[in-house]
Image (cartoon, rainbow, N blue to C red):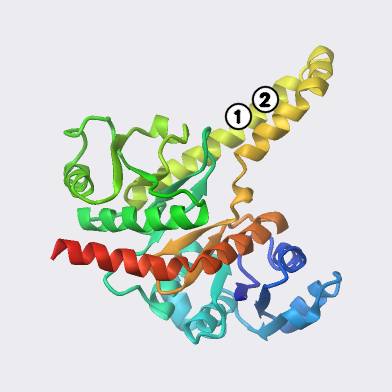
C-alpha cells in the first residue's frame, strides 16, 4: 500500500515523522511512503537513515498550516501546503491512506472537503483507540462534532463497531452510551433519544456507561458527542500522565524508596506501556471516503510508526468497504 504523509504536521516535524517512516519501512515490506513538505529539508532528514529508497517519494510542498490558523481558511488559502498535497494524493487515488499529526481542525476539515464523506454519513467522527484495564476501547466521537443529533450518534456506534471488529479483531463488540448514570431514563434529550435508537438497533448495545467505568475495558465501543468525547480523552491523558508522575516522584523521594524502586521498576514500566497512547499511534476519522489517520500532535517516531501500522491494518482488512456495507444495511433497515 502507498501512504501519504504530511511531513510538516505536529510538534516534532519533520524529524520524528521521517524517523517513524523509516521504522515503518523496516517493519512492513509492503508499505510505500509519499511524504509532503519542503523537498530539501525532507531529503536532508532522510539522509540520516539507511532505508529502501525505492519505497519513498518526496512531494515538494512550500507551505505549512499551523494550529493557530482557521482550518477552512488555511486550507483554501494554502493550496501548496503539505497537508493539502497529502490529502489530494488520496482523493486522486494515488495513495491508499493519509496520516497527519498537524492541526486537528485543518485535518478533519480537509478530509471532509477534499476527500469527502461516505454516502449517507451525516457527520464523520474522530475515533481513537484507548487502553483499558481489560482491553482497549474506542471512543466515537472524540472531538469532531460538539453538537450532535441522535442519528449522528447511532452512526458513530455503527462505525465504531466495524472499526473495532476489524482493527482489534473482536467480533460483535459491545457498545455503550456515555451518560451521567447507568439507568435508561438518565441524561439529557440527546442521550435519551440516542438510547432508544441504539436499543432498537442490531448492535450489541449494553446500555449507558458512566465515565468512571470507561477505563475498565468492559465495553469495546464508547459512544458520545465530540464535546463529551474530547473531555473524556483529555481527562484520561491528564490522569494517566499525573499518576505516573506522582509515582515517580514518590519513588525518588528518599534512599529507601529509591532502593524499593529497583525492585518494582519492571511493574512501573509495564503500567506505563499499558496506558501509553503511542501504542496505537493515531485516531481514524471514520465516515470519510478514505483511510485518514490523525496522529497525536506530540507524536514521536514510535507513535508515528504505529500510526502507519494502524493505517496498514485498516487497509489490509478492507475496513472502509465493510464500513460502507454496514452503513448501507442499517440505512435499509430504517426504511
Residue lying at the far top in this picture: please name it: 256
Where is residue 225? Give x, y as percent.
32, 50
- Quadrant of the rendering where the N terminus is positioned: bottom right
Q: How many marks?
A: 2
Residue shown at the point (67%, 25%) measured from the top left? 247
The reply to whether dot 2 and dot 1 touch (C-beta < 8 Å) is yes
Decide: is 172 above or below 121: above
Q: Which residue is mark 2?
A: 247
Which residue is found at the position 51% from the left and 43% from the top? 136
Indicate the position of residue 109 as horizontal and vertical percent values: 41, 70
Q: Residue at x 44, y 73 (%)?
A: 111
In-image side of 53 versus 247 (left or right): right
Q: Element type at marker 1?
A: helix
* Residue 156: percent from left, percent from top: 33, 56
Label 2 sits on a secondary structure element that is helix
Q: State the separation of the CA atoms marked 2 and 1.
A: 6 Å
Amino acid at each position: 500500500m502507498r501512504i501519504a504523509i504530511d511531513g510538516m504536521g505536529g510538534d516534532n516535524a519533520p524529524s520524528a515523522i521521517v524517523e517513524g517512516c523509516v521504522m515503518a519501512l523496516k517493519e512492513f515490506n509492503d508499505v510505500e511512503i509519499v511524504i509532503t513538505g519542503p523537498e530539501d529539508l525532507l531529503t536532508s532528514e532522510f539522509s540520516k537513515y539507511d532505508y529502501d529508497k525505492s519505497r519513498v517519494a518526496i512531494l515538494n510542498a512550500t507551505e505549512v498550516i499551523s494550529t493557530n490558523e482557521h482550518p477552512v481558511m488555511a486550507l483554501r488559502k494554502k493550496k501548496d501546503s503539505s497537508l493539502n498535497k497529502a490529502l489530494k494524493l488520496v482523493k486522486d487515488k494515488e495513495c491508499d491512506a493519509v496520516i497527519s499529526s498537524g492541526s486537528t481542525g485543518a485535518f478533519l476539515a480537509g478530509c471532509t472537503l477534499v476527500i469527502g464523506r461516505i454516502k449517507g454519513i451525516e457527520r464523520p467522527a474522530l475515533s481513537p483507540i484507548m487502553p483499558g484495564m481489560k482491553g482497549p476501547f474506542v471512543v466515537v466521537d472524540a472531538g469532531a462534532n460538539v453538537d450532535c443529533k441522535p442519528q449522528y450518534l447511532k452512526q458513530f456506534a455503527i462505525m465504531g463497531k466495524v472499526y473495532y471488529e476489524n482493527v482489534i479483531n473482536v467480533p460483535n463488540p459491545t457498545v455503550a452510551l456515555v451518560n451521567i448514570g447507568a439507568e435508561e431514563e438518565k441524561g439529557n434529550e440527546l442521550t435519551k433519544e440516542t438510547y432508544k435508537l441504539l436499543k432498537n438497533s442490531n448492535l450489541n448495545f449494553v446500555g449507558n456507561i458512566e465515565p468512571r467505568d470507561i477505563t475498565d475495558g468492559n465495553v469495546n465501543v464508547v459512544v458520545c458527542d465530540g464535546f463529551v468525547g474530547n473531555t473524556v480523552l483529555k481527562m484520561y491523558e491528564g490522569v494517566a500522565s499525573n499518576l505516573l508522575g506522582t509515582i515517580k516522584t514518590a519513588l525518588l523521594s528518599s534512599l529507601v524508596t529509591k532502593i524499593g524502586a529497583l525492585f518494582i521498576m519492571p511493574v512501573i514500566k509495564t503500567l506505563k506501556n499499558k496506558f501509553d497512547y503511542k501504542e496505537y499511534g493515531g485516531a481514524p476519522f471514520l465516515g470519510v471516503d478514505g483511510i485518514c489517520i490523525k496522529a497525536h500532535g506530540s507524536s514521536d517516531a514510535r507513535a508515528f510508526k504505529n500510526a502507519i501500522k494502524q493505517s496498514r491494518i485498516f487497509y489490509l482488512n478492507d475496513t472502509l468497504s465493510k464500513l460502507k456495507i454496514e452503513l448501507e444495511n442499517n440505512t435499509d433497515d430504517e426504511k
